[in-house]
Image (cartoon, rainbow, N blue to C red):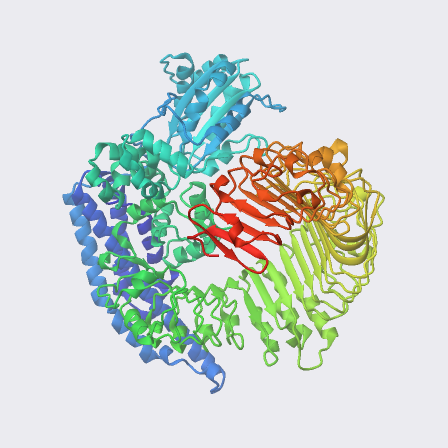
């Protein structure tokens, strides 16, 4: 793969920020190093001169290896300079911590508790030792000399100072036209039809024209699709004016306007100013319906686009603009109405379509089939890759195919990576470095946004200022990369994971060059700064890494690994690192103990030890990591202790201790004022007052779970926490557990009253609260952003808070509230005219003594629950009523184990799923209960006013016992009714039927046979009727079916006639019936598709059958499986007329014996007291 162009503006910007940082100033001041101060100023001056030459160097590197080597040296120097500056800042921080600890120690008047002792590594001697190892004099001289060499080389290379950045240099790009290059466009029929419909359809809107954006990653086929639509004959005939413009990177309004005119008129007009061009275009479009395609737009600035579209308003209604872009933000900016013209998100092709496209461009060769799976794994749905690789293999000898497919060279040679590089070149400088860092992940590795953002932060890739934190900046960077399709949601995960397309990963590796190495430790060089590996690498290495002291990232990205990692091995690895910033060891294996040398990783900012299940504690030296920003200990299930001197980790911003076994919160955690993530904070019987540690943690964000609140002994302590000041929190959970001593519930109530969160909190959960009333702030409309509330296990509360007053509440769950007997007006909010205006999901579960649900006191019931989509009521055995009378948005209703509840179902036009089980009564004001996805009714004592059920577009309908209907998803459309003897009708005639029904099962449904005689669909392939004593003529059912393949009739005592059986039958089972129709009239020999036949105790009609074949019973030669029970007169069977037969089972035929069966070659007979088995010799029976 070609070496990436090197772009260093972002690198140098980081260095400039560090040169002028407060840490450097503090270092110079502490050490009184005037010489170093002058040296640092000189470094900045020289770097500014170098920065001015970067634009020239970045352009010349494509044609000059010497310039590229100069840039590589400069990048190495930038890394080294960062490391040295980091050393300076680290020492300054250690000095400050030492001074603060000494001062605190003396202020405690000799207090010698472990918490207040001065840590040994903060003594003056220790800090001095750190200073000596830094060897500032040598480092500064080395850096100064390197800078001077870089400047000298720049002069000899002829580099000049430029002010115009690379992005402003318009590069020569492949231009597109409206002509179709692909004779067949694979896999885009559906989306093409959708776009054409939107082009031709007259939208009921006031705008003169509509914009249709097509968005997708580079090479996904946006231009090809637009060309196909543009040249469609219906489209050509529909529009008066058509124009195609390839916009590319520079959005020049005058140039684009002129191109539209020239494309539409086939002219070559030039315009001296924008006004003339736009006047001309306005005249051209006046009262005409136009189609304009703006292909390959990169600029996300709104003003130029707004200016371009000014002449469009002169056109006739029905005009359209199609744009294609790789940047989602561009697509959104150009939409006129967000809800009227949705973006077309172009996804990858299927494997079959990729294969067809590949074959179209490759030579026709039978050997292609042998490499099908291999090449499909390379494409990952990208049409450009399929097309390009096909074209490349077309030019290569077949003997070279394997080598090409096993390397990344193919994507370089056939132009895929060069096409994708445009996406990289057009990234802002600040995004280039963070994107290149993403190459640290293995291909197909799923990752969360927060994971990569915290790693960027640890590597110093994110800016920080008063207006925006590093985390917020990183989140914005991440969203930007997603909008450019360089990162994308993982299709295999619904948990918010992201992934990189394989070819985008190749692009990131190209951009990172040799500073990032993944998997292959032998490729680690002196330039490598980032290294990641999996368990395969870990298993095969002796871990004598050699020259890795310069590594900044050392990350494990593998599945769960179960090998033991001895402390000696970890010690040998850690001791080699001098400048490590990211150490990720989640899932790495079985670590029982970490070496003390981990505390010597002075530059470490990110430490992930998650899912190390055997780790019991961290070494005390961990508190020496004064630069540590992120400490992740999630699911270290046996971890009982972090570190004693936690307060020394002053830079810590993120601490994840979820699912650990910590005995208590680390002492001094309240001094970590930079802390933003603290998902768990628990109190114990001995540490109830530790809740005060939360007081100064004002930067907390995300979610916070405070548990053990029963141990708070003073409500004043809760007040001191000032939760309402922690504006970054989105989710707050507070829980109370069992206590070994008597709890004062008044203190519990007063404490919760004081733990009021800020008004913009989004989620709140109270679990195990045991006082009698909820706090006054809960339900206050002051909480304008509250969307989720969960109240669980609060057994003493007798009234619910006025949650109906919350304007944006969308999800409410109330469970295990034994004190609730009535849900009344207080629930909606006294005087609230529009209760629960935004609620979408409402759950009541396990409320044992709840008896009444009262309606709200509003005149118009339509104002209550107007948006409710899901209502679930479970295990409320005493609940009697009421039930909401107006649920226009309801999609799911689930009521289970409410034996006294009378459900009066209103008209629910959007209902999709209905499940009602073990309730007293179901009634409805609608003429029929309609739902579109699933239906289940079980153990309902009484149905009132229900004419029928109508289910449309569902997969399975099942009815069991006294009115039980269940519909769920199956791989086939199936109707199954069990034990419903009084069930007469599935749906009223005017409501239609179950479309495309293929499987019907009727078990003990006496009254339904007559309904199905006239309503059974011709599409049915499988029919089973069991225990139906009203069915006497099977022909009335089967004569409606045209494709019946399997027919099972069992225990239908009234069945006397089979009628004419369908010729399509492949399996026939008739069991325990009293058929009177003579056997010779059954016509079994006509069933030429029949493979399996079972006749078991079918009645007196077979008494005349003495042999098979017999004038009374001929069987079809297609049979392979035959079972006969209860043929009293049967004496012999000849298998010669059944050449396909492989299995016979004969039982309860008293006149038959082994010698009475004539078998063909290969059949073997096995006999018993009352049965005979005949099988092929090769079978095991």
Give how far across and how far down residue 536 sits, in percent: 31, 61
Give the number of callouts: 0
Residue 786 appears in the picture as rendered:
no
Q: Is residue 862 above or below residue 746?
A: above
Front position in the image: 929 or 302? 929
Farthest residue toward the left? 156
Quarter-of-image position of residue 485: top left
Q: In this view, does 931 lie above or below 584?
A: above
Residue 170 appears in the picture as rendered:
yes
Query: Quadrant location of the N terminus?
Result: top left
Residue at (75% x, 37% y) in the render: 1011
Q: Is residue 1021 above or below residue 102?
A: above
Quarter-of-image position of residue 1068: top right
Give how far across and how far down residue 893 sits, in percent: 71, 49
Residue at (45% x, 17% y) in the render: 242
Query: Left or right: where does residue 404 sit relative to residue 698?
Result: left
Query: Left or right: where does residue 381 sit relative to residue 815?
Result: left
Residue at (47% x, 26% y) in the render: 322
Query: Left or right: where does residue 689 sit relative to residue 263?
Result: right
Front position in the image: 699 or 391? 391
Front position in the image: 738 or 704? 738
Q: In this view, does 183 lie above or below 337?
A: above
Give how far across and how far down residue 1117 sits, in percent: 51, 38
Quarter-of-image position of residue 540: bottom left
Query: Left or right: where does residue 56 sit relative to residue 307?
Result: left
Give how far across and how far down residue 423 sits, in percent: 36, 39
């Amino acid at each position: 793969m070609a070496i990436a162009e090197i772009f260093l503006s972002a690198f140098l910007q980081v260095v400039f920020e560090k040169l002028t940082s407060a840490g450097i100033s503090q270092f110079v001041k502490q050490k009184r190093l005037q010489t170093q101060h002058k040296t640092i100023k000189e470094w900045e001056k020289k770097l500014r001169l170098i920065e001015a030459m970067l634009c020239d160097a970045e352009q010349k590197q494509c044609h000059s290896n010497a310039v590229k080597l100069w840039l590589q040296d400069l990048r190495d120097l930038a890394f080294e300079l960062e490391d040295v500056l980091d050393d300076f800042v680290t020492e300054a921080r250690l000095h400050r911590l030492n001074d603060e600890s000494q001062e605190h120690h003396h202020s405690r008047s000799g207090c010698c508790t472990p918490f207040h002792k001065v840590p040994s590594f903060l003594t003056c001697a220790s800090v001095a030792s750190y200073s000596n190892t830094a060897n500032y004099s040598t480092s500064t001289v080395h850096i100064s000399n390197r800078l001077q060499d870089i400047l000298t080389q720049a002069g000899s290379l002829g580099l000049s100072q430029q002010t115009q950045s690379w992005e402003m240099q318009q590069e020569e790009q492949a231009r597109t036209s409206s002509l179709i290059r692909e004779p067949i466009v694979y896999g885009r029929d559906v989306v093409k039809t959708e776009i054409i419909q939107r082009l031709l359809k007259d939208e009921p809107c006031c705008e003169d024209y509509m914009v249709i954006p097509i968005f997708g990653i580079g090479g996904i086929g946006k231009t090809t699709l637009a060309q196909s639509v543009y040249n469609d004959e219906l489209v050509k005939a529909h529009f008066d004016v058509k124009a195609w413009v390839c916009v590319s990177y520079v959005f020049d309004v005058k140039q684009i306007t002129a191109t539209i005119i020239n494309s539409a008129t086939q002219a070559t007009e030039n315009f001296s100013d924008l006004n003339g061009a736009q006047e001309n275009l306005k005249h051209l479009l006046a009262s005409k319906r136009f189609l304009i395609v703006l292909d390959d737009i990169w600029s996300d600035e709104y003003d130029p686009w707004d200016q371009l579209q000014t002449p469009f308003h002169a056109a006739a209604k029905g005009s359209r603009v199609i744009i294609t872009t790789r940047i989602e933000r561009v697509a959104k900016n150009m939409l006129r109405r967000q809800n009227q013209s949705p973006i077309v998100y172009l996804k990858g092709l299927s494997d079959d379509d990729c294969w067809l496209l590949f074959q179209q461009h490759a030579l026709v060769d039978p050997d292609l089939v042998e490499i099908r799976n291999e090449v499909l794994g390379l494409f990952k749905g990208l049409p450009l890759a399929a097309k390009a690789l096909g074209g490349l293999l077309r030019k290569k000898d077949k003997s070279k195919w394997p080598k090409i497919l096993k390397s990344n060279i193919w994507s370089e040679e056939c132009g895929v990576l060069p096409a994708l590089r445009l996406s990289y070149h057009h990234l802002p400088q600040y995004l280039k470095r963070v994107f290149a860092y993403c190459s640290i992940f293995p291909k197909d590795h799923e990752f969360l946004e927060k994971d990569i953002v915290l790693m960027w932060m640890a590597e110093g890739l994110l800016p920080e200022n008063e207006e925006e934190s590093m985390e917020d900046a990183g989140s914005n960077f991440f969203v930007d990369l997603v909008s450019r399709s360089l990162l994308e949601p993982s299709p295999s995960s619904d948990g918010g994971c992201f992934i990189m397309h394989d070819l985008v990963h190749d692009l990131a590796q190209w951009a990172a060059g040799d500073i990032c190495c993944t998997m292959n430790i032998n490729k680690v060089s002196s330039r490598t700064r980032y290294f990641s590996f999996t368990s395969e690498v870990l298993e095969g290495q002796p871990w004598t890494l050699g020259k890795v002291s310069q590594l900044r990232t050392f990350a494990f990205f593998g599945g769960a690994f179960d090998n033991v990692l001895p402390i000696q091995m970890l010690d040998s690895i850690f001791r080699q690192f001098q400048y490590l910033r990211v150490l990720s060891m989640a899932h790495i294996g079985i670590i029982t103990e970490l070496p003390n040398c981990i505390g010597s990783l002075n530059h470490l900012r990110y430490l992930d030890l998650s899912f190390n299940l055997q780790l019991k504690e961290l070494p005390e030296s961990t508190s020496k990591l004064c630069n540590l920003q992120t400490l992740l200990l999630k699911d270290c299930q046996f971890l009982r202790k972090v570190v004693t001197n936690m307060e020394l980790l002053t830079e810590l911003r993120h601490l994840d201790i979820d699912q650990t076994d910590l005995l208590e919160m680390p002492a001094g955690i309240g001094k970590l004022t930079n802390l933003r993530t603290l998902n768990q904070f628990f109190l114990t019987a001995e540490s109830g007052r530790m809740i005060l540690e939360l007081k100064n943690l004002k930067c907390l964000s995300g979610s916070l779970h405070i548990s053990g609140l029963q141990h708070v002994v003073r409500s004043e302590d809760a007040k001191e926490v000032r939760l309402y000041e922690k504006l970054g929190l989105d989710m707050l959970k507070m829980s109370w557990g069992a206590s070994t001593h008597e709890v004062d519930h008044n203190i519990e109530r007063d404490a919760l009253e004081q733990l009021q969160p800020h008004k913009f909190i989004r989620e709140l959960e109270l679990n195990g609260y045991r006082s009698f009333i909820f706090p006054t702030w809960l339900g206050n409309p002051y909480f304008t952003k509250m969307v989720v509330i969960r109240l669980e296990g609060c057994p003493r509360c007798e009234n619910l808070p006025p949650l109906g007053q919350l304007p944006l509440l969308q999800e409410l769950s109330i469970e295990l509230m034994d004190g609730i007997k009535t849900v009344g007006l207080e629930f909606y909010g006294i005087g609230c005219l529009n209760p629960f205006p935004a609620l979408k999901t409402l759950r009541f579960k396990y409320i044992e003594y709840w008896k009444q649900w009262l309606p709200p006191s509003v005149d118009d019931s339509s104002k209550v629950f107007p948006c409710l989509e899901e209502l679930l009521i479970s295990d409320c055995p005493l609940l009697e009523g009421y039930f909401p009378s107006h649920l226009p948005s309801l999609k799911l209703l689930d009521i289970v184990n409410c034996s006294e509840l009378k459900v009066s179902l209103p008209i629910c036009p959007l209902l999709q799923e209905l499940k009602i089980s073990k309730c007293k009564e179901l009634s409805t004001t609608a003429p029929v209960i309609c739902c579109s996805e699933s239906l289940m009714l079980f153990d309902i004592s009484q149905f009132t006013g229900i004419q029928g059920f109508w289910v449309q577009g569902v997969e399975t309908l099942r009815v069991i016992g006294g009115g039980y209907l269940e519909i769920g998803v199956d791989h086939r459309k199936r109707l199954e009714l069990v034990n419903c003897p009084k069930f007469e009708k599935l749906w009223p005639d005017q409501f239609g039927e179950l479309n495309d029904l293929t499987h019907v099962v009727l078990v003990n449904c006496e009254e339904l046979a007559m309904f199905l005689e006239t309503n059974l669909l011709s599409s049915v392939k499988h029919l089973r009727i069991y225990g139906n004593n009203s069915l006497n003529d099977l022909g009335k059912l089967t004569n409606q079916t045209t494709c019946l393949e399997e027919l099972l009739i069992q225990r239908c005592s009234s069945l006397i006639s089979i009628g004419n059986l369908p010729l399509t039958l492949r399996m026939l089972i008739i069991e325990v019936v009293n058929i009177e129709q003579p056997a010779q009239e059954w016509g079994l020999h006509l069933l030429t598709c029949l493979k399996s036949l079972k006749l078991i105790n079918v009645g007196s009609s077979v008494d005349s059958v003495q042999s098979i074949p017999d004038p009374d019973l001929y069987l079809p030669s297609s049979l392979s499986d035959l079972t006969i029970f209860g043929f009293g007169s049967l004496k012999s069977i000849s298998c010669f007329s059944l050449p396909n037969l492989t299995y016979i089972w004969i039982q309860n035929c008293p006149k038959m014996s082994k010698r009475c069966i004539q078998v063909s070659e290969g059949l073997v007979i096995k006999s018993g007291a009352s049965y005979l088995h005949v099988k092929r010799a090769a079978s095991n029976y």
